[in-house]
Structures are given as structure tokens and as C-alpha cells.
Image (spheres, grey):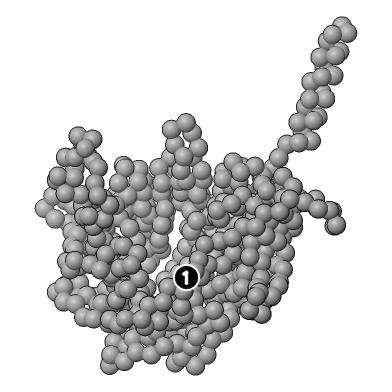
Amino acid sequence: MKQLSLLIAFVFISTFIFAQTKLNWTPEQCMKMKNVSAVVPSPDGSKVLYTVREAVMTDDRSEYINNVWMCNSDGSNHIQLTRGDKNSSNPQWSPDGKWISFTSSRDTKNNLYLLPVGGGESEKITDVKTGVGNYQWSHDGKMIAFIMIDNASDKEEKNKKSKNDWYFMDEQIKQNRLFVLWLDKKDTAGKRVQKQVTKENYNVISFDMSPDGKSIAYSHGRSPEANDNVYSDISLVDIETGNIKSIANTGAGETSPSFSPDGKLIVYYSSTDPVDWAGAKHAKIYSLEDGKNWRLKATPDENGGIVGWTSDGKNVLWSESNKTLNSVYLLSVDGKSVTEWNKGSTDMLGAFSINSTGTHMTFVLQNPSKLPEAYISSLNNFSPVKLTSINAEHADKPLPKTEVIKWKGADGKEIEGLLTYPLNYKTGTKVPFILNVHGGPAGVFTQTCVAANSGTYPIAAFAEMGYAVLRP
């Protein structure tokens, strides 16, 4: 009886000690945090698609996979649309809001799938040997344009099967090509008609289909290599004839073309001329009527990228870092004004998406002590509505304090940094310190959640272990 009492006491004390030392934010736990990787509003703004990224960590797999979900724009009625341990991502709405498209690697290749919003089985609509990249619906819902990388040669396939698949890096470059798939046309074999619309030997980077569905504006570089891709140009291809017209071809890097709602203008992203990796970036407009182009008013950081157009075609939305946060700016098409859309926001916003009618914007919102979740807002004014609670089970776990601190550099310029204190830090206490320096040349640390795995380092885990971390 005495031995049993001692055993019970030992188990009780051991459990108590373990409970006292149990950590909430180990590096592994941070890696396993779920993330909203995309949020897409429906054409009428009543529903939202979003993807949840989760870690697969087994003896034979170590990767992240995404699955597609749908909910109402008030955050109700969440429905999981894809399941399984294969990646499903990049969801989009058909223009009439009746269909959902997404890409999935469920059969080893990344193919395009269609799913009716009202319910039913998904249908694979491409059967490619490599993988479908970025894609877009035409405005009438009859076509989908997409990017696909070159197929492996017969010799490469043979070498792969025989396990003789060594190669010299970049000796045989594979280019991304632009294709169009007709949803309402099938060939004699019953497959949907597909056409390659770019045959030139260059790499397609980004594209946008015109509102009338007759042409595609696309950016392209000499190859996918970094030193080729940044020196990109923009062209316009006629889908029916294949005729190509140059839109932007200078010493600058020009990419991300986007048609105005009326199809008369194209906005695109441009670096300085010549290209400066860490230099200023601006939005430029090209007029299809007269071929004129002009630069829009510079944003505060002269960096970032194009989000889309307002429904009236009078403004372009541009997102960029604003010190340690992110801001979305309205750039007037006449080049005269720039206005901060989310002015006054103290949270970090990212993963922006505008619906096809230009009425709503979705994004991921977080801060150092708030877990990232999906939100939606009317484009008329910044009024975020929370959609998801994918990490609800972690919401009550304590997170360390993070504050923005400032100091002057050797040249007298003010520098900011994010200082994360150890969890339960007591003022005046000396603690071990980590200086976390990011890469360059133009990066910036932002106020993302310290427990989320969107960054490189598990900041919350360091803080729980008693470290202070400074990210300048």
C-alpha cells in the first residue's frame, strides 16, 4: 500500500512538473500552424473561397499541402471543397459565380479542375504532362487561359525511367508558354479544345485576358533565370490569329499587365530604366487607342505591386510595405493622386484579391500577437469582416510582446526594428538576445504573427525559451 501511494505521488508530481514546463510554441508546433494561403471573393461578393495550408510531417513526407474551402461573406457556413493529402490550390470563381476552378496534383501532375458551386464531383479539364501554372477565366466564362512549362523531351523521360537522370543545371531551359482552353468546344476525342498562343522562344511570366476575350496581354523574359526574368517586356497577342504586338519593350523590367474594366487601358508594373534590383517601382498605363503611355503617381515606398482596378476604371490599387506594415493605395489613372485605402489600420494585411466586378477585396489580416485569418471588405471603404478561425484552438495561448523600436544609423537616418520580448518578460531583467538579420537588398520585416510559419524563424519559440529577438 505504501509503495502504491509513493507511485501515485510520483506520477502526480511528474505530471505537474511536465505541465509546468510544457511549451506552446516549439519550432515543430510553429511549423504545424495552419495558414490561409489565398482568399478570393465571388463576383457578387456574397461568398468567399479560401485555401488552408497544413503541414504533412511523416516518416516519408515533409511538405505543406493546401485544401480549398468556401464560406459566406459574413463568415458563416464553411464548407470544405477538396480533401486528401494532395495539394489543391489557386481557387477561382467563374464569372457567373456558378463554378469553382482550382489546380490540384492529385494525379501527380498539377491539372485544372472544375466544381459546381451547388455541389457535385469535380471534373479534371486538363491532362498535362508537366503542370498548369497561373490561369484566368475569360469574362464570358467560355475560355480559360493558363501558363504551362515545356514538356520533358523523349530522351529526358527515358533517362528518368532508367534512373539515369543527372543533368547539367540550366543546360536545357524549359520555358513557360501561354495556352487557351475552350470550355464550350470539344474535339473528336471528346476533349476540350486547347491552343498554344505563344510560340516564341521566351518565358511567359504573367498575363491578363481582355474583357472582350479576343486578346491577352502578357509579360515575358528571355528565360526563367533570374537575370533574364527581371528584364521582362510586355506584348499583346490576338487569340484567333496569333498576331503579336509589343506594348512595353524598354530597358526597364515590365510585368503584371492588367486591363481596365472597359478594355481601353493596360496598367503594368515597371522598374527603373535600366533595371535596378533595389530601385524604384511604379505603375504605368498604356492606352490601346493611341499607344501612349504614362506613369502613375509614385507611392511612398516606390515598391510593391498591382492588386487590380476599381470597378469604375478610375483608379488602380497598389500594395506595398509601409514601414513594418502593408498599405493599399488608390492611384488615379490620370497620374495626379495617390490615396491610402486602409489608412489607420494597425494590422498587417496581405494576400490581396479583388473580385471580378471590383466591389470587394479579400486579404489575410494579422499582427505579432494575432493569428492570421481571412477577411473581406467592401472596396468603397476599409471595413474588414473576419471570415475564418482556422487556428481557434491556439487563440488562448499566450504570445510574447513585440514592439517597433527606432534608432539612428551611422548616416543619421532613422531605422526601425521589431523587438520581441521573452514571454512573461520582467522589466530590467537581462536575457539572451538574438539579432535576426534578413536578406536583401530591399526586403523588410513586417508585423506578421510571431507564431505563424510565414517567416523563416520560429520567433514565438525563441521568446518562450527566454530569448529577446530583434529584427531590424
The image shows residue 441, relative to residue 77, as above or below, that is below
- Say which residue label 1 marks: 354
CA neighbours of label 1 inside 10 A, class few (<14), some (14 to 19), many (20+)? many
Q: Secondary structure at mark 1?
A: strand
Give the image quarter of residue 186: bottom left
The image shows residue 174, relative to residue 307, as above or below, that is above
User: What is the three-letter code of the residue carrying label 1?
Assistant: Ile
Say how many tags the image has: 1
Residue 24 at x, y percent in the picture: 69, 42
Residue at the limit of the structure toward the front, as seen here: 410
Residue 253 at x, y percent in the picture: 35, 76
User: For the point 19% across and 59% down, which residue is it?
Assistant: 194
User: For the point 61% across and 69% down, which residue is it?
Assistant: 325
Q: Is residue 461 left or right of residue 114?
A: right
User: For the point 81% across and 14% down, which residue is it?
Assistant: 7
Question: As rendered, which of 78 and 24 lies closer to the eye?
Answer: 24
The image shows residue 150, relative to residue 61, as above or below, that is below
**Quarter holding the C terminus?**
bottom right
The image shows residue 258, relative to residue 334, as above or below, that is above
